[in-house]
Amino acid sequence: MLRMSLKIRVKICGLSEPDQVRSAVAAEADYVGFVFFSKSPRNISVAQAKALAALTPEGVQKVALVVNADDAFLDELVAQVPLDMFQLHGSETPQRVAEVRARYGLPVMKAVGVAGPDDLPMLDSYAAVADQLLVDAKPPKDADLPGGNGLAFDWRLIADHSWSVPWMLAGGLSPENVAEAVRLTGARQVDVSSGVESAPGAKDETLIAAFVNAARGG
């Protein structure tokens, strides 16, 4: 019964406009995610992120999603934007995760793509060095994006699995399926991007509110 009483924490990722941040905050999201990846329709500049971060109140975690970013870019990012967490969404090694944590003193969430049972040991490897895990659907081999593809994986693969650090479920979540995803996996945190969009990169205020409500059993 205790598990059911805990509030599901929600991350709305890929925010690029002031109204999108306001919508996520109004819906009582716990995290807002900013994407720094040129191929993504949700990509923003450091200057844009700085402006969006200024709209984000205390208590809402500001997460920077980066893909195989070098220190020069991360240095610029942390100098300009008051971030709360990095989300490493590329092919960063466990060693690189540890380096980023040590260099910047910020929590690091490592995204790991899952398609089948053979992918699960990688989660254990990253749990040893990351502050959180993002359990995402593995993108197709020909995909341009490492995430945000609107794809889900078989949630039964991680049913009631636990790791040594907090974890977040991502991949193909929407207002229609998030409650079932939480039920099947036991996830206490969920992440959404394309599932609350009316078009790629265009977040929808109504869908954001519906997603948060559904995730928390409303």
Image (spheres, rainbow, N blue to C red):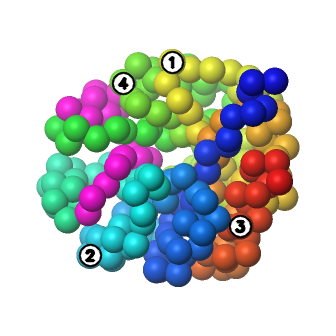
Q: Nearer the viewer, mark 1 or mark 3?
A: 3
- Residue labelled with disc 3: 209
Count of number-bearing discs: 4
Q: Bounds of the magenta span?
A: 81-102
Tell me the distance, in whole angstroms, between the alpha carbons under discs 4 and 1. 10 Å
Amino acid under disc 1? Ser
**Circle 1 residues within 10 Å: few <14, some 14–19, many ≥20:** few
N-terminal of the pair, mark 3 or mark 4, is: 4
| Cβ atoms under marks 2 and 4 closer than 8 Å | no
**Circle 2 residues within 10 Å: few <14, some 14–19, many ≥20:** few
Amino acid under disc 3? Ala
Q: Position of residue 41 (x, y in %)?
A: 50, 74
**Circle 3 residues within 10 Å: few <14, some 14–19, many ≥20:** some
Query: In terms of image quadrants, where is residue 76?
Result: bottom left
Q: Look at the numbered disc 1 and give the secondary structure of its residue.
A: loop
Tell me the distance, in whole angstroms, between the alpha carbons under discs 1 and 3. 31 Å
| Residue 97 shown in magenta | yes
N-terminal of the pair, mark 4 or mark 1, is: 4
N-terminal of the pair, mark 1 or mark 3, is: 1
Circle number at residue 47: 2
**Circle 4 residues within 10 Å: few <14, some 14–19, many ≥20:** many
N-terminal of the pair, mark 1 or mark 2, is: 2
Residue 115 visible at all: no
| Cβ atoms under marks 1 and 3 closer than 8 Å | no
Name which residue lies at 77% across and 65% down: 210
Tell me the distance, in whole angstroms, between the alpha carbons under discs 3 and 2. 27 Å
N-terminal of the pair, mark 3 or mark 2, is: 2
- Left or right: where does residue 213 sit relative to residue 63? right
